[in-house]
Image (tube, rainbow, N blue to C red):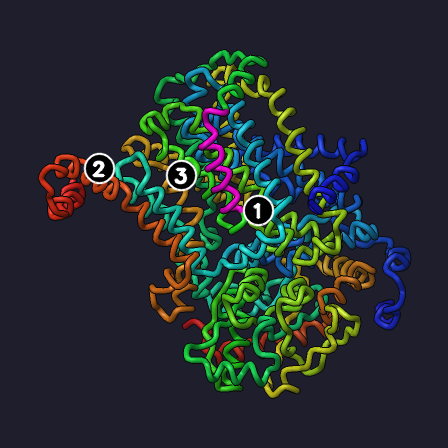
Amino acid sequence: MKQMGKVLGGFVMGLAFAATSATAMAWEPTKPVEIVVAAGAGGASDQMARMMQAAIQKNNLMKQPMVVSLKGGASGAEALMYMKSSDGDPNKVLIAYSLIYMLPLSAKIPFNWRDLTPVAVVAMDQFVLWDNAGGPKTVKEFIAAAKAASSPLKMGGTGSKREDHVLTVFMEKKTGAKFSYLPYKSGGEAATQLVGNHTEANVNNPSENLEVWRAGQVRALCVFDKERISYTTKVTETQSWNDIPTCKEEGIDVQYLMLRAMFLPGKVTPEQQAFYVDLFQKVTQTPEYKDYMEKQALKPVFLKGPEMLKFLGEDDALNRSLMTEAGFVAN
Amino acid sequence: MEAFGLLLHGFAVLMTWKILLLMMVGLVLGIFVGVLPGLGGPNGVAILLPLTFAMDPTSAIVMLSCIYWGALFGGAITSILFNIPGEAWSVATTFDGYPMAQQGKAAEALTAAFTSSFIGSLVAVLLITFLSPTISSFALKFGPPEFFAVYLLTFCSFVGLGREAKHKTVISMALGLLIAGVGMDTVSGTLRMTFGSTDLLRGINFLVAVIGLFGISEILLTMEERLALRGHAAKISLRVVLSVWKDLPKYWATLLRSSFIGCWLGITPGGAIAASFMGYNLAKRFSKDPESFGKGRIEGVFAPETAAHASGTAALLPMLALGIPGSGTAAILLGGLMVWGLNPGPLLFVEHKDFVWGLIASMYLGNVVGLVLVLTTVPIFASILRVPFAAVAPMIVVSCAIGAYAIQNAMFDIWLMLGFGVAGYVFKKIGIPLAPFTLALVLGSRAEDAFRLAMIGSGGSVGIFWSNGLVGAITTLAITLLFWPVIDKVFTGIGQVLRPARAQIIGPVKVSRVPRQSSTE
């Protein structure tokens, strides 16, 4: 296969690939392809799906059109069950995130990502600890304020017993401070509530707080990763993503990254799977994708095949242990 | 005055043939989308979004927002002609619009609906033009307690000001709240009342319920009445339009009140739906003749339509200024903005002046063009009524089914719609009002979430609903409206007691007995 060359040739532009990777007898979709979003309109998954839709359309990566289908009902469970019931349908792609591990545990949704066909991991999303621009200036001051507060500080986040909630619990465990967690319906809502001073902090993804950060309404305290975000272009007047310290540097040893991955329904043919692996690999080469990664401070990665399976297995185990330790697994 | 200059600049951006053409196309598509039940503004905009990827952002947003205006106009058409709300916010329009159509005044009702839509949008656009910087900071004042207070206000105004028997309103509302609880509970992250069914996971969709409750049940009722719905020859002419317009100044208070409610609820994402109901109820409350509402009073069309459109338009303001969409359609437009590389948020007004003011200018133009367009097509729409019921009914049922299916692409929703159709029929037969039910269904889970978040934040103290002037005022107003009939009686009681009391000077002892009497009714 020529995949080796592709992995190495990250510098080659997407359009060039359209010519090289066309094989004579490859499977192709004959109907419009549905890209299934397990979240509401305007959320991070929706934005990413629309970026892919635009990238595929503008660069002519596929003959059939791609439509975004929002299945954010029941905190995204709707999308999972929809994919599960679409066995053998190669015209539906799920854009998945950590809910594929967490939702079956917390809400006992009869779903296992192993029932679906993995295509590719296309990015990793960061989590950042934010507070209001008028609040404490460093992590240490923030934790001190949290410990000194007479009633627990309010931490906003998306949904209950999910990534944001887990991170909050682990911050409590590592620092000894207490927070009261307010589950909002979306990251956007959590962002505006922080700006309006209705909560004291949140652990939004960079994309969810980007605009209020640029407007100087919130402060980025630390990022929950082993290393700093690599982008060094100034985003606000004074700071780039790279200027945000890691939480470990600041004394909270908590790390969490969230996958953004594509899945097909179960029981599709290897040719169909191969078509989409190829398609999304091309997407990751487009300028639209690269722009998006930088703007939203996502980690560009591309995993497929056995590499992806290994990653999913480890990630699943990690999320399971975090959920168990946080006490979020339903009996 | 800076705003004025920028607005003129915005008009200059728009005045090209290409943009005007896109505007017309968008409006026509929007009206169609608004007429089909279920296939509302959000779906229309979502389906057409990919078409705009190749356009420049300004043309794209002008076209998409024109679809939005078109859908806002179109939603009223089916409400008035068939008692089927094309859009959720048109539910309140059916209360008086449909009786008017039955009395052969379909043209007047439609003209009234379109005109008031126009007025509502215009007020909201003026607000956006001149107040956008200050208004967006007002929206930030809304945390969970404030949101809950607004929802409470909507619920209370319904119970307190409604025409129906109070217990029936409460029963209907309670049933709605119960149904709204089905599905995932965001606050605890667990499932409720799904009984292991995958179809119930996503909850009961509000529009599916509305299509069934209003559309299907209406067909059932009409069938029982031996297909009595006959086409009334609606004579439409410039004269009708002008005569409705001539009467407009009489209703200035209603129009102003509804515009205000709409702008307010649009900015604080309470939504067009709550606004239309509240506009209707308050118009009835302040009317000299509340009994005539629901029987085909033109004011009953003016009030909800003005509020719904003011709110639908104002909902774009928090989207542009804060990145929080005030409505479903605004949420899709938000997604579109991001595809075009524009990030809604506090900096949009600073960094993309051309775009923002082009959009605002397009709101003025789109509404003027839209009004002319719908008014000239009123005869076409009203003539649908002349088609025999036996021919129209199957088409309505099919279009309801398509609408219910299209919302979430689920066959289950069609069965659900039929179920709600039967429920709506039974409700109408035993005299339980449908409006409180639908209101509770749409606002129930938001109200619940807001209440529980407020409780988590306050550690369980109800005092949080009076913790600052804003939330305190709204909550107090809500409770006042809930007990309005009682309070009203007390005041009339005081009035009656005081008149003879001028001679005898009787203390408040007697007065305090009045509410007790009224509450034992």
Q: Farthest residue in the front direction?
A: B503
Residue A144 on the magenta segment: no
Residue marked by disc 2: B492
Q: Chain under label 3? A: B
What amino acid is found at the position of numbered circle 1 in the picture? Ala
Q: CA distance from mark 2 to mark 3?
A: 41 Å
In three-dimensional space, the C-alpha distance between marks 2 and 1, rounded to whole angstroms, equals 40 Å
Q: Which of the two labelled residues, at mark 2 and mark 3, occupies the earlier sequence position?
A: 3
Secondary element at tag 1: loop
Q: What whole-number distance in Å separates the C-alpha atoms at marks 3 and 1?
A: 30 Å
Chain for numbered disc 2: B
- A176 relative to A66 in the view: left or right: left
Mark 2 vs mark 3, foreground winner is: 2
**Secondary structure state at the residue bearing disc 3:** helix
Q: Which amino acid is tagged 2?
A: Thr
Protein chain holding label 1: B
Look at mark 3 in the image and give the residue it sits on. Answer: B420
Q: Is residue B359 shown left or right of residue B106? A: right
Which residue is pictured at 66% across the width and 61% down the height?
A: A263
Where does residue B174 sit, x and y in percent of width and height?
32, 48
Circle 1 residue: B315
Q: Badge 3, how many Cα within 10 Å: few under 14, some, many 20+?
A: many
